[in-house]
Image (cartoon, rainbow, N blue to C red):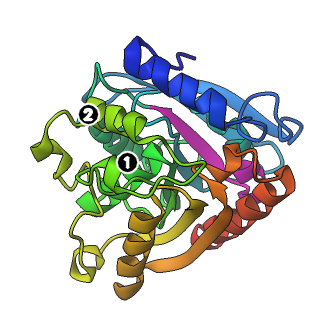
Amino acid sequence: MRPGSGLVGRLAVRAISVTSTRRSGTPGGPHTTLPIDVSEVRVPTRRGDVRCLIYTSTAVSKPMPVYVNLHGGGFVIAYPEQDDGWCRFLAHACRATVVSVDYAVAPRKPFPIAFEQIQDVVRWAASPSRPWDGSRLALGGQSAGGNLAAAVCRAGSPAPVRLQVLQYPPLDLTIDPGNKPHPKGAIPPFLARAFDAAYAPSASLRADPGVSPGRKVEARDLLDVPQAVVVLCGRDSLEPEGREYAGVLAAAGRLVDLIEVPESGHGYDHSRTVTPERVDEIYARVASHVKAGLS
């Protein structure tokens, strides 16, 4: 709806347009024919009302489980529609309701605004007054959304979460992007710096576990987090910190699956190097874990 504003937003939009075809993750993609109803609601939070897109399978009449989805965009792009294909696929494959959150973005609304909004949306989604089964709830996100999902889960979710899905997330914003690997397909360091500074303007904020849930984390810190599925892209500057976090999750007994996409740069489902068939293969593997975790 509003892909970006200001210099940081314009840079982000330019980078995404260069690195992405958005063939599977936007309106008009190959999953629009699935029997899914899409509606819009406004969810009240302590940080203002938040627009959410609700994806509901029309093939199921009984109360369904719910998956709260957090889109990517470097913390600066407010565009949940980029995950339209994923949300449709997940709602159909899992016979679930998907709540895709249009959380507030930086630099106008830096940390902790989106973090707190998502906490409140999770609490709202888990309420027994909703038309789905809020006792069976999963939380997941892509890129910046994966960071937010991991941070909310590590902080202690305001409602029981059965599964967290972390897809190519940034997990340690204290590391200068120039000191991370940046193969072809990765986010350019200058752009990653702009994202990080917009979301968490100070070094002390970037060290906060709510911003960097993977920083100096040990197994004892993750013993009580929800079970996790982690998806990593092999040609991504964020792959090492994601792999390290997955290892700590495994040591804590919380890792369900580590899914690797070695041929992809950041964002396999928006990458020119990954075929639609391969994207759907990964989607299906993730969805199988979501379905099992919410059964």
Which one is closest to the eye, mark 2 or mark 1?
A: 2
Instruction: Identify which residue is drawn at 47% across, 42% down.
Output: 129
Question: Residue 225: x, y in percent?
Answer: 34, 70
Residues in magenta, as a range: 89-102
Along the viewing direction, whichever of 239 and 148 lies nearer the viewer: 239
Dot 2 crowding, Cα within 10 Å, few <14, some 14–19, many 20+: some
**Residue under label 2:** 197
Judged left or right of residue 15, residue 85 is right
Within the image, what quadrant is residue 249 found in?
bottom left
Whether residue 37 is visible: yes
Question: Residue 139: x, y in percent?
Answer: 48, 55
Badge 1 amino acid:
Leu
Instruction: Identify which residue is drawn at 70% across, 46% down.
Output: 271
Whether residue 78 is visible: no
- As drawn, the residue found furthest toward the right would be 33
Q: Is residue 160 above or below residue 189?
A: below
**Residue 95, magenta (yes or no):** yes
Q: Earlier in the sequence, mark 2 or mark 1?
A: 1
Instruction: Identify which residue is drawn at 41% across, 34% down.
Output: 191
